[in-house]
Amino acid sequence: MQLTLYEQTVIFLRSFALGAVLAGIYTIIAVLRTLSPPGKWLLFFTDILFMLIAAFLNFMFALSCTNGMIRGYSLAAQLIAFCALYLTVGRLIKKSSFLIRNILQKTWQRITLPVRSVCRRIFSSVLIKCKKVLKKLKKNKISLEK
């Protein structure tokens, strides 16, 4: 089956987009690894999971765009996009992940500060009342024993 130049260009661009999506997925996995280093088994599992996702997406792409035929330029476009994005934007995101995490933590603390302070006040007042009740119960128990 012969494809026109237009169809080949569309397949190439779609392959490039698929490579960018795969680079994005792998960048997310790399950031998660950076923030909390996994053990050997979890590392192995995440690598296998990524490979399965990539294989599935490539298979579905080949079925939908090229009628199941594997095209060399399609694989090359995916590889170029993956390498270009992961080695540039992916590295920047990975290096700035600690900064992003700290900003998100501080923002979360600022958002939840009013709720935490109200919960602390409620808990402390309930605790004080419980102590008073326990004190009264102990006093009544001692007076009943006499």
Image (cartoon, rainbow, N blue to C red):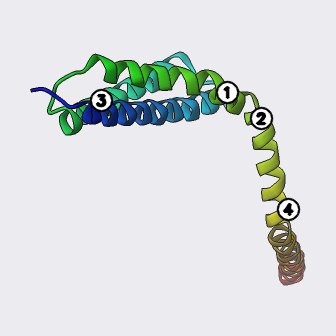
Measure the alpha-carbon separation of dots 2 and 1.
8 Å
Residue 142 sits above or below residue 68 on the image: below
Residue nearest the viewer, comparing 75 with 120: 75
Q: Which mark is residue 110?
A: 4
Which of pointers 3 and 2 lies earlier in the amino acid sequence? 3
The spot of residue 72 in percent (x, y) is 29, 16
Which of pointers 3 and 1 lies earlier in the amino acid sequence? 1
At label 3, the amino acid type is Asn
Secondary element under disc 4, as helix, strand or loop, is helix
Q: Which mark is residue 98?
A: 2
Measure the alpha-carbon separation of dots 4 and 2.
18 Å
Q: Which mark is residue 34?
A: 1
Res 69 seen here: yes
Q: In the image, is 65 to the left or to the right of 18?
A: left
- Which residue shows up at 18% across the image and 35% down it? 63
Residue nearest the viewer, comparing 108 with 125: 108
Q: Disc 3 designates what residue?
A: 58
Secondary element under disc 1, as helix, strand or loop, is helix
Badge 4 crowding class, 10 Å Cα cut-off, few under 14, some 14 to 19, many 20 or more, is few
Residue contact at pointers 3 and 2, CB within 8 angstroms:
no
Which of pointers 2 and 1 lies earlier in the amino acid sequence? 1
Measure the alpha-carbon separation of dots 3 and 2.
32 Å
**Position of the N terminus by quadrant:** top left
Secondary element under disc 2, as helix, strand or loop, is helix
The spot of residue 146 in percent (x, y) is 89, 80
Measure the alpha-carbon separation of dots 3 and 1.
27 Å
Q: Which mark is residue 6?
A: none
Check the image and name the residue furthest to the left: 1
Residue contact at pointers 3 and 4, CB within 8 angstroms:
no
